[in-house]
Amino acid sequence: MHKRTLFFTALAATAVAVACPVAAQTSPSGQTAAGASASSVDQTFLTHAAADGTAEVALGQLALQKSSSAQTKQLAQHIVDDHTKANEQLVALARQKQITVAPEPDAKAKQKMDKLQKLDGDAFDHAYAQAMVKDHQAAVQLFTKASTGAKDPDVKQFATQTLPVLKNHLQMARDLRQESRSSGQPQSSPPNTMQETPRTSPPSNTPPTTGAPGGRSGG
């Protein structure tokens, strides 16, 4: 419990530190001069992407701490590295466009982290893989839409450049999920293809008798 509290406290502190330069430019109404005229589509995309990206980093760090699976750790490390880089680019882009973002996991993501905290071993690996598949399916959909529908060319370029990374994460997560399913299934014995040949009595070498032992022929 203490570890989880420290984890979220550090995460919140990081989010505040990153968001402060952007928030400092906002008006009392919560909008900036440039942000007020920015496309609502672009604002929504950057806001959601910032929250989701921060959540993926937090979940990846959790997997690195709890999992003993090399494949799970490999996926988690990719996600932490790639999403950290993408988050930095996103915050810089939002600052440039004077759009306020709060890179902090939402309530749903925090609930997911709480559930994963309680799992260990194969159960954790499978749940983490399942969560990454679901999260990255949503992320690919979000970034695909922004790559074609964003109004600002810089926002559109960011979405387009990040999309292949998310697709790669999704494929890795699917592979991990399949691996965790296979390893969790009990091994069944192979079918016995050898048919047992019924036993037969060996042929007798004794010639058949035609009369009673010691009998005499009549005459």
Image (cartoon, rainbow, N blue to C red):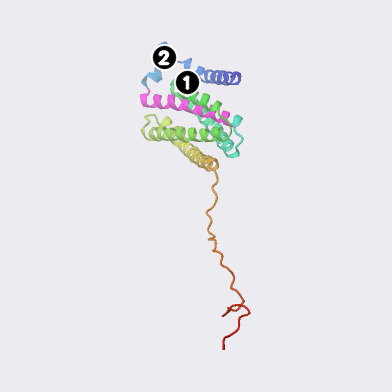
Quadrant of the image occupied by residue 142: top left
> What's under tag 2, amino acid-wise?
Gly
Q: Total of numbered circles in the picture?
A: 2
Residue 1: image location, x then y, percent: 58, 19
> Is 215 in front, or is 89?
215
Q: Earlier in the sequence, mark 2 or mark 1?
A: 2
> Is 153 in front, or is 125?
125
Instruction: Name above or below for residue 169 compared with residue 56.
Output: below
Please state the extent of the stretch shown in magenta in the rendering.
Answer: 38-63
Instruction: Name above or below for residue 152 compared with residue 71.
Output: above
Q: Residue at x 54, y 61 (%)?
A: 196
Name of the residue lying farthest toward the front: 219
Residue 118: image location, x then y, percent: 55, 26
Residue 149: image location, x then y, percent: 36, 32
Mark 2 highlights which residue?
A: 30
Kindly state the secondary structure of the residue where label 2 is placed: loop
Instruction: Name above or below for residue 63 compared with residue 71.
Output: above
**Can residue 39 be seen at all in this image of the molecule?**
no
Nearest to the eye among marks 2 and 1: give it: 1
Kindly state the secondary structure of the residue where label 1 is placed: loop
> What's under tag 1, amino acid-wise?
Ala
Q: Mark 2 and mark 1: span between their CA atoms?
A: 12 Å
Within-10-Å neighbours for mark 2: few <14, some 14–19, many 20+: few
SS assignment for the magenta stretch, majority: helix
Mark 1 highlights which residue?
A: 102
Within-10-Å neighbours for mark 1: few <14, some 14–19, many 20+: many
Q: Residue at x 60, y 39 (%)?
A: 70
Name of the residue lying farthest toward the right: 214
Name of the residue lying farthest toward the bottom: 219
Residue 203: image location, x then y, percent: 58, 73
